[in-house]
Amino acid sequence: MRAELRAALEHLSNEALAAQRRAPTAPYELAADFAVEYPQLKSLLCIGGVYINQLLVQPAWQLRDPRAFLEALLAHWAALVESDAAHDNLDEPSQALVVLLQANPALAPHVAAMGYLSKLLAAVPAERADVQRAAVQVMRVLSEASEVVHALRSLDCVKPLVVAMKAAPSTCAQLLPSLTSMAAAPEIVEKAHEARLVPFVLGLLSGGLEQCDDPSAVKAHAVKLLKTLAADARLGPTIQAVLDEDRSWDAFKQQEHDLFLAPDAERGLLTGTGPRVGLLTSQ
């Protein structure tokens, strides 16, 4: 790559020198579309000036303009989701979106401000496994931001998550804690009650965990979600009455199920942020 750059600069230098000989007083300007073509980078995905594979290796890298990169990444991700792009085309942008939001929590409110929450919610119950997995991971990260929860109050945000968990129990490990975070808003508790979320979660506890990944963690998240819903100021008593009528709830209500969670199960989706070295951006 260094050789490619030297060759390009030598060519520019020769052009500038020839132009100066023809017209000594005329300024020489670099063409607006000039770029050094590096064959080594042609196969690498670059979005918003950032090489995605390098970001995944170094998720803690300090980007020059994280918000601009977020906008470009969301636009690229949404276009892939709405198209028939294959799994391998969607995987890297999805992972990049997750690690970007994890490393820069302050960016989460911008996702809501840019109007992408509706598209994310629509993708959660998608039939395509790769689209669903990507949307679930992003929602898991976004739900931790209070500004995002505030924006979700005006959207049909619970029903798509319930539909996804019923169709794909493997999503419960991430969507249940997302719903727990979202239950901080009374309006979302009301949506959860209308979507019959409580009976569904009780069904998981009474024998629906066999198809879930990491049943112990799902059980802990389910209990925490139900307790959070029951603590709501307005609908809490109604939800608690539903819990009290369910015999299986007696086995869980007095236990501290957070002990079943692995150290990273409560927050992170991707771990192991490496040192900030190497090429990351395209300029």
Image: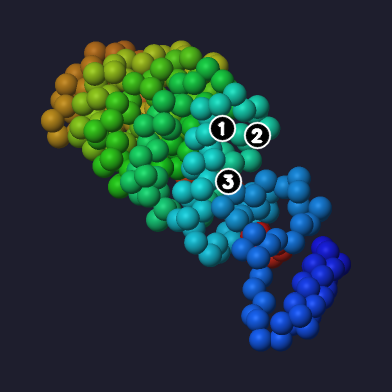
N-terminal-most mark, 3 or 1: 1
Q: CA distance from mark 3 to mark 1?
A: 14 Å
Q: Which residue is mark 3?
A: 96
Q: Amino acid at mark 3?
A: Ala
Select label 3 or label 2 by which is in front.
2
- Residue 75 versus residue 41 in the image, above or below: above
Q: Are discs 3 and 2 less than 8 Å apart at CB?
A: no
| Of 43 and 53, the residue lying toward us | 43
Q: Earlier in the sequence, mark 1 or mark 2?
A: 1
Q: Estimate the x, y position of residue 215 in percent, counting from the top left.
A: 52, 25
Element carrying mark 1: helix
**Residue 67 in picture, x, y percent from top left:** 45, 56
Res. 80 mark: 1
Which residue lies at the image location 53% right of the left edge and 65% below the top edge?
Answer: 64
Q: Is residue 267 left or right of residue 190?
A: right
Specify the quadrant that holds the N terminus.
bottom right
User: Badge 1: few (under 14), some or many (20 or more) residues near its Cα, within 10 Å?
Assistant: some
Q: Are marks 1 and 2 in contact (CB under 8 Å)?
A: yes
Image point (76%, 48%), residue name? 42
Task: Using the rendered image of the protein, determine whether residue 238 is visible from the camera's viewpoint.
Answer: yes
| Mark 2 element type | helix
